[in-house]
Image (spheres, helix red, strand yellow):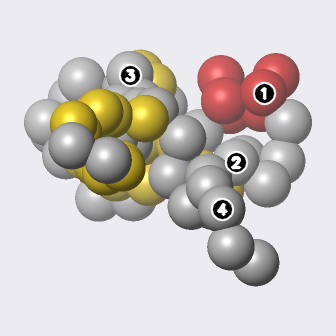
């Protein structure tokens, strides 16, 4: 069940909703005013710092396990 962020065009409130199907995002209403005049906000990709050796790099996946060891 993906969690989406929405913004209301009528009252400018920002809120999150669990949406079971992507096709149901057009049925979301504002938590504050009840308006259906809302739009889905762009999600940001989490970045985590991965260090190893003498240099640092960034990974776009927060679920990666450290390499080596177990």
Whether residues under marks 2 and 1 lie with C-beta atoms below 8 angstroms apart, the answer is: yes
Q: Is residue 24 left or right of residue 28?
A: right
Which residue is depicted at the point 56% across and 61% down?
Answer: 66
Q: CA distance from mark 2 to mark 1?
A: 9 Å
Disc ID at residue 68: 4
Which residue is depicted at the point 21% across and 36% down?
Answer: 55
The quadrant of the picture occupied by the N terminus is: bottom right
Q: Earlier in the sequence, mark 4 or mark 3?
A: 3
Q: Is residue 60 left or right of residue 51?
A: right
Instruction: Find residue 59 and report its horizontal and vertical position in percent.
Output: 43, 35
Q: Earlier in the sequence, mark 2 or mark 1?
A: 2
Residue under numbered circle 1: 22
Q: CA distance from mark 2 to mark 3?
A: 13 Å
Q: Secondary structure at mark 1?
A: helix
* Category of crowding for the residue at label 2, using alpha-carbon neighbours closer than 10 angstroms: few (below 14), some (14–19), many (at least 20): few
From this view, report whether residue 23 is shown above or below residue 20.
above
Instruction: Find residue 40 and report its horizontal and vertical position in percent.
Output: 45, 25
Q: Using the image as rendered, state which of residue 23 and residue 10 is in the foreground.
A: 23
Q: Secondary structure at mark 2?
A: loop
Residue under numbered circle 2: 2
Q: Secondary structure at mark 3?
A: loop
Task: Decide if residue 67 is in sight here.
Answer: yes
Disc ID at residue 42: 3
């Amino acid at each position: 069940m993906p969690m989406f962020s929405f913004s209301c065009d009528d009252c400018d409130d920002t809120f999150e909703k669990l949406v079971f199907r992507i096709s149901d995002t057009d049925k979301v209403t504002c938590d504050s005013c009840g308006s259906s005049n809302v739009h889905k906000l762009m999600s940001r990709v989490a970045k985590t710092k991965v260090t190893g050796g003498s240099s640092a790099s960034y990974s776009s996946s927060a679920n990666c396990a450290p390499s080596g060891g177990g």
